[in-house]
Amino acid sequence: MRKATGKMVSTDMQNSFTEENYLKIIHSLSGREGLEVSTNALAESTATRAASVTDMLRKLADKGLIHYKKYQGVRLTDLGEKVAIKVIRKHRLWEVFLVEKLGFGWDEVHDIAEELEHIPSEVLVEKLDAFLGHPRFDPHGDPIPDSKGNLTEPDYLILTDVHISEKVLMMGVLDHAPAFLQYLDRSNITLGCIIEVKEINDYDKSAFVQINGAHTLFISLEVSKNLLVQRL
Amino acid sequence: MRKATGKMVSTDMQNSFTEENYLKIIHSLSGREGLEVSTNALAESTATRAASVTDMLRKLADKGLIHYKKYQGVRLTDLGEKVAIKVIRKHRLWEVFLVEKLGFGWDEVHDIAEELEHIPSEVLVEKLDAFLGHPRFDPHGDPIPDSKGNLTEPDYLILTDVHISEKVLMMGVLDHAPAFLQYLDRSNITLGCIIEVKEINDYDKSAFVQINGAHTLFISLEVSKNLLVQRL
DNA sequence: ATATATTTTTAGGGTAATCTAAATTTTTTA
DNA sequence: TAAAAAATTTAGATTACCCTAAAAATATAT
Ligand SMILES: [Mn+2]
Ligand SMILES: [Mn+2]
Ligand SMILES: [Mn+2]
Ligand SMILES: [Mn+2]
């Protein structure tokens, strides 16, 4: 438990790695609608205990980064949102760098980007962005916020929403776990490939799909639920 | 003041940013001959107080990274040397990346590399090295250790050792301060340029030099002392 | 509408890295 | 070589982040 400290609200003070990770996680858990995020959800995502989360929430609130009323969950303030989006921008740009320039697989880059995202320097981010050719999406299909902090989530479908004989474009993944991404690699399911749903098993919702009009395979509901797609 | 803890010696445990910075500084201050480094010298270089240095030295000694006997100064162990060289390798490779790929000036990259050098991941370093074409020297002319940890310092001359009418190749700088590097930029003194010493003022050792057989300028002893060169 | 279960916060600590002030050791000077 | 100066270490705190256990608040179920 920590004491309260003075309030301060400033655009460009230093936030620690830990604070930045919290902000990013709050952003992600509160979703498009900016719902309240619970202490327990944060404890789970940060792999810490609820008591530690409470301490950190107090600190983030003192810094003006989150709205926090005891027992009521938290939301990002405008300032907190801005900081979170900056970190997300850095994370995704570094992932593009790692995959496009260094030749990493999309299953290998998350942990490294998790560190690189905290390197401070506005000019570094902007030069990296230019070097990469201002990419709009990261290797997992996630949108990259622009330099002004605009982040527009495209509204993709989930493969489970696609009907039989429809053809869709593979646009992204919901699960970023290496094991899942490696499974997709082995199945030749890559960003931009065309997926045609041939059959859906009524019993377990597993599906028979064709990739790029070529090879076919069965995928489980669990897989379908994690594929973001778009109608052609 | 901190308590002593158990000893452990292992090749690939995690060292903190702070520990890595200490090792790098000890390496640099102890020079080619591996001389003992004093507590005060470290306090100066790390911008901390001597008491803080003593605490850290104890920790580094416990981890088997330095040889430390109270009041006697410190030297790196073989393990500490290995870790220090890995950090130096990362620092210099990232500097090459920042200058060659992102278009930073050689005066702008030090602080950013100071952060990037602590990103863990052997494979990242090796892929970065390959992407950069296995550079041998960083933007300041400092040699980059190879992937096995071999670091060979070329034995350059300092411009003060060069006699009148000798022509030398500019190979590196001793001072890395942005102000000095910017001065060199303005004077068109770049890595690889040819410097011919035309005159040396006996009184203050300032010199009249010609760059690339073209323009001439006066440089102070302070500048000469910080230029590493090589006879043609 | 209670009683029970769940969630969240508070209390009290721990470690890493820092600090100031005071003690101790080594070096320098007279 | 003893006194003074300088360097170094120890003592005792502080801050950031994290922990367990206990208390308090909220949500759920009878
Ligand atoms: Mn992170
Ligand atoms: Mn991603
Ligand atoms: Mn550093
Ligand atoms: Mn350098």
Image: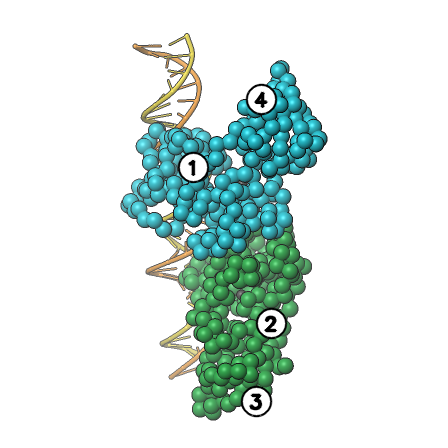
Chain colours: A cyan, B green, C orange, D yellow
* Frontmost residue, A50 versus A87: A87
Mark 3 and mark 4 residues within 8 Å of each other at the beta carbon: no
Disc 1 CB within 8 Å of nearest ligand 1 atom? no
Circles 2 and 3 on the same chain:
yes
Disc 3 CB within 8 Å of nearest ligand 4 atom? no
Per the image, the residue denoted by label 1 is: A27
Q: Nearer the viewer, mark 2 or mark 3?
A: 3
Q: Amino acid at mark 3?
A: Ser
Per the image, the residue denoted by label 4 is: A163
Q: Amino acid at mark 1?
A: His
Q: Residue furthest bottom?
A: B202
Q: Which mark is residue B33?
A: 2
Name which of mark 1 and mark 4 comes first in the sequence.
Answer: 1
Q: Position of residue A93 (x, y in %)?
A: 51, 47
Per the image, the residue denoted by label 3 is: B165
Name which of mark 2 and mark 3 comes first in the sequence.
Answer: 2
Residue B48 lies in quadrant: bottom left
Image position of A76 (left or right of A215): left
Report, in whole angstroms, how far the alpha carbon at label 1 lies from the one at label 3. 66 Å
Residue B67 lies in quadrant: bottom right
Report, in whole angstroms, how far the alpha carbon at label 2 lies from the one at label 3. 33 Å
Identify the subunit bearing mark 2.
B
Report, in whole angstroms, how far the alpha carbon at label 4 lies from the one at label 2. 73 Å
Q: Quadrant of the C terminus of chain B?
A: bottom right
Q: Position of residue B197 (x, y in %)?
A: 54, 86
Report, in whole angstroms, how far the alpha carbon at label 2 lies from the one at label 1. 52 Å
Circles 2 and 1 on the same chain:
no
Q: Amino acid at mark 2?
A: Glu
Q: Residue at x 41, y 45 (%)?
A: A149
Say if residue A230 shows up in the picture: yes
